[in-house]
Amino acid sequence: MEDRRTKPPLLYIDQNQNSIPKVESQSAFYSAHQKNSKEKEVKAAKRSSRSRFQSLSTQDKLEYIMNLQETLPVLKCRFLTKEGSLTGTVEKANAEKVHLIVRETPRRRIINVEDLLDIQIIGF
């Protein structure tokens, strides 16, 4: 007697016997020598970007700091003057004066552009 639970398949799907996938070899590769040369180029570009800011004049450095994108955080800088150095951020600047916000008291200082010797970027 047949088992009542088993039934024949409802749909028979014919399997294609000729569909063997083609295997292709690797067409390109990178060697360690190429990778090292690219890393050296990237490091050289980073060094040149750091030295680009230092090669600018004082007025160009102020323009660079003032014209940063608004989405970036404010840069902390070290301002070297004839009297000494100050660490802070630029609030506003024009052709003759720079308004700074510093940590020491008084919190806000105004410096003449003529008195600035150098500007160094410390970080964010």
Image: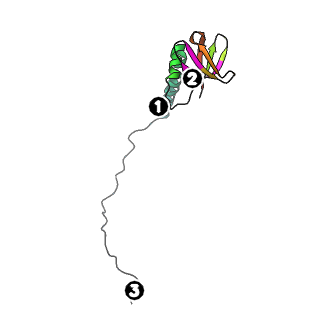
Identity, as a three-letter code, of the amino acid under mark 3: Arg
Cα gap from disc 1 to disc 3, whole angstroms: 70 Å
Q: Can you tell which quarter of the image residue 98 is in?
A: top right
2 or 3: tag closer to the N-terminus: 3
Cα gap from disc 2 to disc 3, whole angstroms: 88 Å
Task: Tell me where residue 71 appears, x and y as whole percent.
Answer: 50, 32
- Of all residues, the one furthest to the right in this rendering is 105
Q: Can you tell which quarter of the image residue 5 is in?
A: bottom left
Look at mark 1 in the image and give the residue it sits on.
34
Question: How crowded is the residue under tag 1: few (<14 C-alpha within 10 Å), some, or many (20+)?
Answer: few
Residue at 50% over, 25% down = 68
Q: Which mark is residue 91?
A: 2
The residue stretch that appears in magenta: 86-99
Q: Secondary structure at mark 3?
A: loop
- Judged by depth in the image, the label closer to the viewer, 2 or 3, is 2
Question: How crowded is the residue under tag 2: few (<14 C-alpha within 10 Å), some, or many (20+)?
Answer: some
User: From where the camera sits, is residue 51 visible?
Assistant: no
Identity, as a three-letter code, of the amino acid under mark 2: Glu
Look at mark 3 in the image and give the residue it sits on.
4
Residue at 50% over, 34% down = 32
User: 21 and 122: which one is in front?
Assistant: 122
| Image quadrant in which the C terminus is located | top right
Identity, as a three-letter code, of the amino acid under mark 1: Gln
- Colour treatment of the image: rainbow
1 or 2: tag closer to the N-terminus: 1
User: 84 and 20: which one is in front?
Assistant: 84
